[in-house]
Amino acid sequence: QINTAALQKLDSAHYLHPFTDHTDLAKKGARIITKAQGVHIWDSNDNQILDGMSGLWCVNMGYGQQSLVDAATKQMQTLPFYNSFFNTSVEPAIELATLLSEITPPQFNHVFYSSSGSESNDTILRMVRRYWDMQGEKQRKTIISRKNAYHGSTVAGASLGGMTGMHEQGDLPIPGIVHIEQPYLREAVKDKPELKDLSEDEFGIVAAGWLEEKILEIGKDKVAAFIGEPVQGAGGVIIPPKTYWPEIQRICDKYGILLISDEVICGFGRLGTWFGCETMGTKPDFMTFAKGVTSGYIPLGGAMVSQRVVDVIYKDGDFNHGYTYSGHPVACAVALANIKLMQKLDIVNTVKNDTAPYLKKMFEALNDHPLVADAQTLGMVGGLVLVKDKDKNIGFDDDDNVGMICRGHCFDNGLVMRAVGDRMIIAPPLTMAHDNIDELLSKARKALDATLKDVSK
Ligand code: PLP
């Protein structure tokens, strides 16, 4: 028997939660999640909740996959840990590196392992600088990223990210990282009303052009790399216009700048291709990943490094970088089982041809709701904007807290949807069946109706 009140008290007394308002948490008490199966989670009061966020964009293959549990158990019994520092290596890490080289785009033959997305992006920052140093272009230090991007919480990750709330706490970004505007038309027209009549495709070219402007402002021989998520996730599922990424690639090629695709969310099938860059049509020099590589069953991250970069960075043999848990055998064994399961179920093609088109049809139907504008999906991510006056296109103020109100109603109706400001977002498990998607949408609609009632009071 779980004593919810006692756990909540201890939680509040001792546990500092990530990205959480602790005043609010102490008032309400944490919802204690106790078990999960398939695409549902349960709390300590036995409420069954549909997981519209795959945990935190990670449980791509859903809960209760026995082959992942078996892989972890077997590896823990045989060899729970050994490092790869002493001219040593471990079988699951070797096998996974080989499999990753097979399923990633052809420019990738090597992986560097970490335990998270943040560490993976830290790794890249060091590799990019090392690359240009080895090329005799030490002055190429600046990495260009985007406002509202999320690349992690370490000093480098939060600096690469474009979250002002994070920058304000801790004097970030570190020198050498600058941010351009994101490709989000609704936001862009607030400062640049002249953009309002552009088509999505025209806007994509304009938004990518901000990269070129920034390169020329900094000096084209000083820019090292551009980093971006194929679809900005934590920033609110900002789906870029189709023209955006090909134009970014053209600009990177023109100035010889390295392209980093942060695949922590978009990798491992989320957009209906193995990696998001394949959906977007780019050919990055680095891809960082985490989350979906193990379906979140155990922490693992990494960076795929293209052959041309490996040839330069490892020319002298070594690169002084690594984590105790780089290539952790248990994490790698779980990742292997996860990827093999994805292959066995042909999940990426199923997402592309069946699940994602159905989700799109159902989710985008929310555009008829009086509170909703711009409901859109791509693959298995989706986002919508909550608006105060749909006809006049007037949004809510930050103080209205509309996203958090709606998130509360989602939970009350047995659904996890995430709120980012005035945007409500989803990233359901790739294993969702049509009836799960129907359940998601009917619960989302109820939550929206309840939110409308609240904000109309
Ligand atoms: N990059 C992206 C795109 C992410 O969404 C995240 C986490 O949400 C990260 C990096 C950081 O990953 P982690 O939380 O595993 O450090």
Image (cartoon, rainbow, N blue to C red):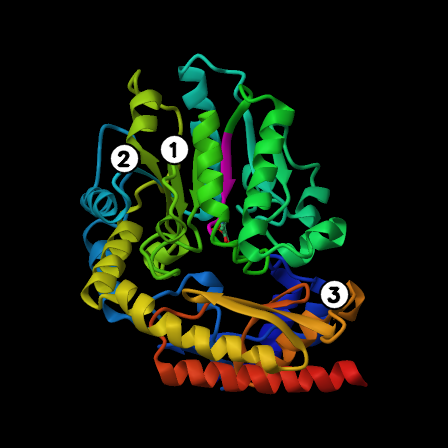
Residue displayed at 50% across by 82% down: 441
Q: CA distance from mark 3 to mark 2?
A: 43 Å
Amino acid carrying label 3: it is Thr
What residue range appears in magenta?
225-230
Residue displayed at 61% across by 68% down: 10
For the residues labelled 2 and 1, say whether their Cβ atoms are less than 8 Å apart.
yes
- Find numbered disc 1 in the image and state the secondary structure of the residue it sits on: loop
Q: Is residue 154 shown above or below 434?
A: above
- Find numbered disc 2 in the image and state the secondary structure of the residue it sits on: loop
- Find numbered disc 3 in the image and state the secondary structure of the residue it sits on: helix
The numbered disc on residue 84 is: 2
Residue displayed at 58% across by 57% down: 199
Residue highlighted by disc 1 = 322
- Percent position (x, y) of residue 186? 66, 59
Dot placed on the residue nearer the N-terminal end, 3 or 1:
3
Amino acid carrying label 2: it is Ser
The residue lying toward the viewer, choosing from 280 and 288, is 280
Q: Is residue 124 shown above or below 401?
A: above
Dot placed on the residue nearer the N-terminal end, 3 or 2:
3
Q: CA distance from mark 2 to mark 1?
A: 9 Å
The residue lying toward the viewer, choosing from 199 and 172, is 199
The residue lying toward the viewer, choosing from 201 and 208, is 201
- Percent position (x, y) of residue 49? 49, 81
Query: How dense is the environment of label 3, judged by Cα within 10 Å: few (below 14), some, or many (20 and up)?
Result: few
The numbered disc on residue 23 is: 3
To which quarter of the image does residue 353 belong?
Answer: bottom left
User: Looking at mark 2, is its residue's CB closer than 8 Å to ligand 1?
Assistant: no
Q: CA distance from mark 3 to mark 1?
A: 38 Å
- Percent position (x, y) of residue 383? 55, 67
